[in-house]
Amino acid sequence: MEDQVKKTVRAYLKKAHQEMESAKILFEKEFYDQTVSSCYYCVFHATKAALESIQVTTVSHKQTAIQFHNHFVKTEKVSKHFGEILKELSQNRSFADYDITWAAQKNEAEEALQKASAFLSVIEEILKIGSSKESLGV
């Protein structure tokens, strides 16, 4: 990867890790809606890192999901399962952020944490970037 592309990828991965850490703290405080939202943003930023690594830039959440599907799911760089995680967490984030009648339960927030963590790990493996905080500049 070119230097600027690497910097951009690392910046997105740093944000993904920050969202994961935020999600864990929010979970401990029993803020389950916010946990779900942060898990989505962890996955979203990891997705952006993957796309930037192949020099695909997106300007919306929907476009990001479509391009991830086209470049990583359809090409089998990741299993379909990870495309489903992105879709599910996106939907749940919308409920958590905008639907005042919806409330994430503890088990849903815990599942979101597990899925976001697995997604981030897979993206880092694809990009061959370790998750150490030093390598990400965290």
Image: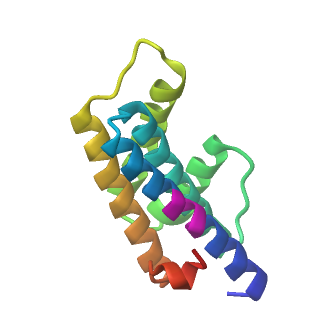
Is any part of residue 107 visible from this angle? yes
Q: Which residues are magenta?
A: 13-18
Residue at (44% x, 58% y) in the render: 21
Q: Which image quarter is the C terminus in? A: bottom right
* Residue 43, image x, y percentages: 48, 54
Q: Which image quarter is the N terminus in? A: bottom right
Classify 91 as above or below 126: above
Classify 22 as above or below 117: above
Residue at (54% x, 85% y) in the render: 135
* Residue 28, image x, y percentages: 31, 45
Classify 124 as above or below 59: below
Mostly what secondary structure, the magenta segment? helix
Residue farthest to the top, as pictured: 101
In which quadrant of the rendered view does residue 61 lie?
top right
Q: Nearer the viewer, residue 78 or 133?
A: 133
Query: Which color scheme is applied?
Result: rainbow
Residue farthest to the front, as pictured: 29
